[in-house]
Amino acid sequence: MGQGACQAIEDARILAEYLNKYENITQAFANCNAHRKEKINTISKQSWNIGKMAQMNNRFLISLRNKLLQLTPPVMIQKQAHHVYNFETTK
């Protein structure tokens, strides 16, 4: 999905917010990690699944995958991408 650099930049921005919010650096890092964990796990799972689908070798499954992708409503694709591209702030 090409999200490594993008997520690193977002991590840095969120970490800066937490470092400004907490005097204790250990607490800032712990809270930042807790805040980012769900999004990073979701992106990792999506990336793994996309990679697995992209590397199929079975012609029938490739054909089925391609047809399903053509039939997928744009709103479903937008909903899935929203979590990845939603710009976060600290809570």
Image (tube, helix red, strand yellow):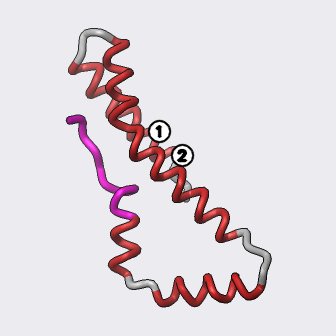
Residue 47 on the magenta segment: no
Residue 47 at what x, y percent from top left? 56, 57
Q: Residues within 10 Å of mark 2 (few under 14, many from 20)?
A: few
Q: In the drawing, what numbered circle is on residue 4?
A: 2
Residue 71 at what x, y percent from top left? 47, 90
Image quarter of residue 90: top left
Helix, strand or loop for disc 2: helix
Residue of label 1: 8
* Callout 2 amino acid: Gly
Viewer-proximal residue, 20 or 22? 22
Helix, strand or loop for disc 1: helix
* Callout 1 amino acid: Ala
In the rendered view, tell whether residue 66 sits above or below residue 29: below
Q: In the drawing, what numbered circle is on residue 86?
A: none
Residue 85 on the magenta segment: yes
Image quarter of residue 11: top left
User: Which quadrant would the N terminus be assigned to in this image?
Assistant: bottom right
78 sits to left or right of 42: left
The residue positioned 28% from the left and 24% from the top of the image is 18
The residue positioned 73% from the left and 73% from the top of the image is 56
In the rendered view, tell whether residue 44 sits above or below residue 62: above
Q: How many marks?
A: 2
Viewer-proximal residue, 74 or 10? 74
Viewer-proximal residue, 77 or 38? 38
User: Which quadrant would the C terminus be assigned to in this image?
Assistant: top left
In the rendered view, tell whether residue 33 sits above or below residue 87: above
27 sits to left or right of 50: left
The residue positioned 40% from the left and 74% from the top of the image is 77
- Check contact, mark 2 vs mark 1: CB within 8 A: yes
Q: Which residues are magenta?
A: 81-91
